[in-house]
Image (cartoon, grey):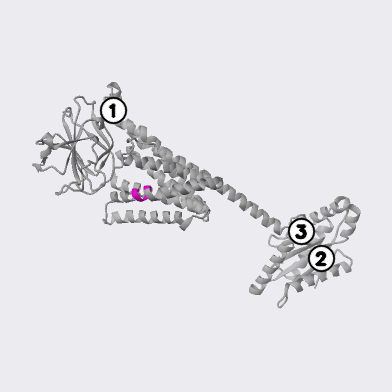
Amino acid sequence: MKKLLIILLLIMPSFLFSSANESNKVDLSKFKWEYRLGDSPFENDIPLWTIDSPNSKWKEIIYPSNPLDRGDLKNVWYRVKLPEHLPADPNLYIFSIDFIVQVYLKNKLIYDFGEFDENAKGEFKGWPWHMISLPSFSENEYLYFRIYSNYIDIGLWGEILIDSKGNIYEKLLEHDIPKITIGSISIFVAVLFLISFLSRRKKIELLILGLLFLTQGLNVFFSAKILDIFLFYPLLKQYILLIVFFFFPIGMAMFMDKIITYKVPFNIIKRIWQFHLIYLLGAVFGSLLGFYSIASTYEYFDIFYNFITLPILTIFMVYFFFKGDRQTKIVTFSFFIISLYWVYSSLIAHGLVQWEEYPSDIAIFICLLLLTYSIVDNLNYTKELEEAKEELIILSSTDYLTKLNNRKKIDSVLEENEKKFKRYKDDFSIILLDIDDFKKINDKYGHLSGDEVLVGISNILTEFTREVDAVGRWGGEEFIIICPKTNKDEALVLAEKLRNKISTYDFKYLGNITASFGISTYVENSSLKELLLKADNAMYLSKSKGKNRVESI
């Protein structure tokens, strides 16, 4: 944001000047253009085609790009005659040029991008926009473009305008502020998704969506031309744009592969993203190592993507949209939107549709928003399932009335403690207790009152035992407490404490209620069956000795 303010301050004088003088913007793409194939001879660094060039040697062309008779030639010259009247502070704005260029006004070099060697060739330096300041004597003079390209395209591409610098910057800002905004938002959302993935690694969809947001956010962000005023590294920028551009079919196919559960013939969606991933890595490292030009990788990518990947994925998108559930429909519809955008951009790139600077940022952002909605909706559904699963686990291991561990859970805890004893020799004891005269309570006051007693005693047992102790309902009016790392004497102390708490608890109209306790401790060469039998015998010994007692065997 600070840099944008600096740009506004820098160009404010130009804005004021252009507002005081009506803009006479010139659209050079509508003018008469001519071309000559090959390269001009030079004399004293002056291209002879600019000073001694019979008109018969120049051929007319509608737009200065891709002459039909080019063949295998990699050099071409274009020229256009400037009008008699130019805007104040005239600057030539060109959207893009394939590849490297020198611009001459008459026979004077006024601009160059890239370096021509002695063979009139040069290396690819990126696809930046160009702004060329025109001298004051430019009116009614020929402007020449010397171009080299070993790419499928050779020449200019997109807009060719002459206007004041202030108006050109204003135009760039008008197009680029939405891109910078949407790109920044996408990158921020990408970081959130990637952080979410790191916190729950099982959700690979979060990683894919995060990478999609990151790459497409960078794509939109770096397509803002105004940034080149401060950061003019066109080749580095081109590598970044190549990575994010080539990643989209990877992310799209990978997301479909992970989200859509329907089987596809030959697992073709997976094969598509695997192929594109290999192609991306080969394009980056192969061009860095000098095996081929980075620009040439676009040519083969376009062929494979437009004629194989996109048709196959589109067929599956339509199929899944009509067959799939709600989430599948959202995912496929979002990719269908972006596919239409890709088709439209390809038609423009191949000259089948008139060029315009289309709002790619909006199409991408809508697609990503729909994908985000689908994944968030899926996460909420998954969260509900996880919560339901946890609830089922609790219900399957909990006594419905008392909320204590049920018989199944107690058996599991007993087995765990037995294993620990056999491995570490950790003592553990159990306490069995039975409510005295519980049948009389049910007969006299009813089963609801009996239930109140069971809940009350379960609360006492939970409150006055340790967190490590496992308290459970053993059956009917019987309860059990498993006490890890507890010997017989320690279990006796705890049981006596619990007996006293129960006998002194106020059960209101039910009066005082007591319980009989039996204790046993696991010993070497014993078993759980023997442990439970001893505790049960001890409990019935308490009953036989008058109840409301603690006994151990």
User: How many neighbours does mark 1 have within 10 angstroms: few (below 14), some (14-19), or many (20 or more)?
Assistant: many
Q: Nearer the viewer, residue 459 or 172?
A: 172
Q: Which residue is mark 1?
A: 14
Q: Can residue 185 be seen in this snapshot? A: no
User: How many neighbours does mark 3 have within 10 angstroms: few (below 14), some (14-19), or many (20 or more)?
Assistant: many
SS at circle 3:
helix
Report x, y in % for residue 199: 52, 53
Q: Which residue is mark 2?
A: 517
| Quadrant of res 408 | bottom right
Q: Nearer the viewer, residue 53 or 95?
A: 53
**Quadrant location of the N terminus in the rendered image:** top left
Asked whether, in this view, residue 218 is left or right of residue 330, the answer is left
Q: Which residue is mark 3?
A: 461
Q: Reading the chain from its start, which is encountered first: label 3 or label 1?
A: 1
Asked whether, in this view, residue 544 is left or right of residue 44, the answer is right
Q: Is residue 81 above or below residue 48?
A: above
Q: Reading the chain from its start, which is encountered first: label 2 or label 1?
A: 1
- Residue farthest to the bottom, as pictured: 525
Q: Which residues are magenta?
A: 302-306
Q: Please name which of the two marks, 2 or 1, marks the residue nearer to the observer.
A: 1
| Quadrant of res 501 | bottom right
Q: Can residue 165 be seen in this snapshot? A: yes
Q: Is residue 490 above or below residue 22?
A: below
Q: Reading the chain from its start, which is encountered first: label 2 or label 3?
A: 3
Give the dominant element type of the magenta stretch: helix, strand or loop. helix
Report x, y in % for residue 96: 28, 39
- Circles 3, 1 touching at the beta carbon (< 8 Å): no
